[in-house]
Amino acid sequence: MKIVMFVVCFAIFLFGLWLMSVADVVTGWEALTFLGGILAVALSVAIPVHVLPKFD
């Protein structure tokens, strides 16, 4: 189960980095795209730090 959650969190992390990198290309939605990337990266870190220890 920990390997599956690692893969999921890593995928969310990479998606957040991708969102932040394409934020300057998206016309009219730059700030929201970058904010979405920041939230995705924060979520990918928060899941293993705060949620997973409760299920051990």
Image (tube, rainbow, N blue to C red):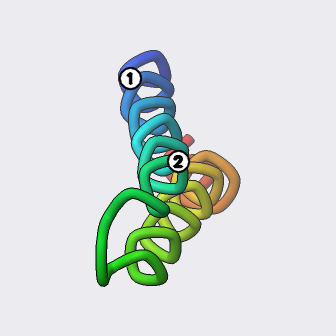
Report x, y in % for residue 37.
Answer: 49, 61
Mark 2 / mark 1, whichever is N-terminal:
1
For badge 2, the amino acid type reads Ser
For badge 1, the amino acid type reads Met
| Residue ID at (69%, 53%) | 49
| Residue ID at (38%, 23%) | 1
Rendered image: mark on residue 21: 2
Compared with 13, 43 (above or below) is below
- Residue furthest top in the image: 3
Rendered image: mark on residue 15: none
Question: Residue 26 is drawn in which quadrant?
Answer: bottom left
Q: 1 or 13, which is in the foreground?
A: 13
Q: 31 or 38, which is in the foreground?
A: 31
Taking 38 as reference, is 40 left or right? left
Does dot 2 land on a helix, a strand or a loop?
A: helix
Report x, y in % for residue 31.
Answer: 48, 82
Q: Which residue is mark 1?
A: 1
Taking 39 as reference, is 4 left or right? left
Classify the position of the C terminus by image quarter: top right
Q: 45 or 38, which is in the foreground?
A: 38
Mark 1, residues whose alpha carbon is within 10 Å: few (<14), some, or many (≥20)? Answer: few
